[in-house]
Amino acid sequence: MISPDQYPTIANQLLTWFTQNKRPLPWRTDYAPYHVWVSEIMLQQTQMERGVTYFNRWMQMLPDVTAVAEAHEDDLLKLWEGLGYYSRVRNLHKAAKIIATEHDGIFPETYSDIRALPGIGEYTAGAIASIAFNQDVICVDANVERVFARLFDIDTPVKQKQNMEFIRKTATEMLPSGRAREFNQALMELGALVCSKKPHCARCPLQENCEAFHLEIPQERPVPIAKKGIKHIDVATGFLMHNGKIYIQKRPEFGVWAGFWELPGGSVEEGETPEEAVVREFMEETEFPVQIKDKILVVKHGYTTYRVTMHCYFLTFAKEHTAEPVLHAATAYQWVNMKELDAVTLPAGHRKLLDHLQTDLRLIPLLENS
Ligand code: SF4
C-alpha cells in the first residue's frame, strides 16, 4: 500500500513527466480563463483532436466572453454543431451573459463564483480554478479516476462514493502547494496518454509505486460497473415538399435537441409500418394530411443509450391543403429550399440524412427543384 510519505515523490515524478511530455494545446499558451473554460466545456464527451479544431474555430469567431454574451444562440449552436450535448453551449451562453453583466466581463476567480455559473460542476470549477488561476484545488475526471484506481489498486467500481472520496482526499494530500495548474494537468495527461484504457506501463513515470502494475492487473482496473442496456428504436420522418420548398419546424425549448429545427416525425409504434408512422406523425404534429411519394433511405445513428434506425420519405399533401400547419410539437415553422435547410442547425440524425441526400445522384434533380 502506498503511504503518504511517498506522495511527494509521486507528485514530483508526475510534474517532471508533464514538463517533458505535455501536448502543445492552444489554451496552454497563456492559460487565459476564457480559453480554459471553453476548452473544458468542449472537451467533455469530445476527443482531443476534434476539440482543438472546434476550439480554434470558436476563438476565431468569438475572441472573448463579451462576444459570446452578445452572440445569437443560433450562431453558437451552428459553431457547436457536431459536438453533441447541446446543453453545454446553451450554458456557455448563459454563463457568458452573467459574466458580462455581474462580473464586468471578467471571468470570476473564486471557486464558489466559478461553480455558481451555469454548466459548471465540481470538476469544471476545479479545473478552471487550478488551470486558469493556479489555485490549490484538485479536479478529478475519468482519466484521474483510472490512474488512481490502478495506482492504489481500487478493487470496486471507482464511482462508488467511498472510492470517489478516497481519490479526492488523496489527490488533495498529494497536490504540491502552488503547483495545481501543472499537477492536475499532469494527472489528466498521464491518464490520456500513458495510463489509458490500454495502459503503457513501460513508459510510465509512476511504475515503481503502482500497485496494479506490481500485481500485473492494470487491465483489470478500474473495475467496471454493469452497463446500461442499449435501446433500439425505429423512427420515421420525411421531407414534405410543397411549391418547391421543404417544411421544417422548431422544437420546444426543453427536452432533447431543444430549440433545433427538424423534420416532423417520431417513433414507429408497435404494429405500425414506418410509412404509417410518418403519415400519423405529420397529422399529430402539424395537422397536415400527407402521402408518401417515395422512400428515400434508411439512416442509422446513435445518441446516449439509443440506437436509432430512421426511415425517411419524400411526402406531398394527400389533398389540397393550406401551407399553414397547426403546431402541436413545435414553436415555429418555415418552408425552406435546400440551401436554406443546409444553413440551419439540425439534430445529428437529420444532419446525417441531409448529408446522404446531397450525395445521392438519384435525388439531386428533386432537390435542385426544391
Ligand atoms: Fe497506469 Fe501502468 Fe503507470 Fe500504473 S504503471 S499508473 S497502470 S500506466
Image (tube, rainbow, N blue to C red):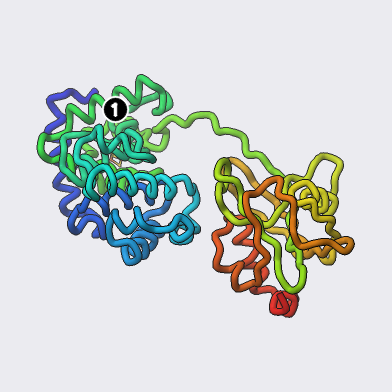
10 up-or-down from 56: above or below: above
The residue drawn where x is 29% and y is 23% is 166
In screen coordinates, is 181 left or right of 65?
left
Q: Measuring from the top left, give residue 163's x and y in whole percent.
A: 35, 23
The percent coordinates of residue 339 (x first, y second) are 60, 73
Where is mark 1, residue-wise?
167
Give the residue type that dot 1 points to: Ile
- Quadrant of the image where one finds ligand 1: top left
Say which quarter of the image contains residue 245: bottom right
Q: Is residue 90 left or right of residue 281?
A: left
Q: Residue 213 placed where, x, y %?
A: 30, 35
- In this view, the residue in front, 82 or 243, is 243
162, above or below 138, in the image: above
Along the viewing direction, whichever of 104 and 188 lies nearer the viewer = 104
Position of residue 42 measured from the top left corner of the image (x, y, whole percent): 38, 51
The residue sitting at 60% across, 61% down in the picture is 351
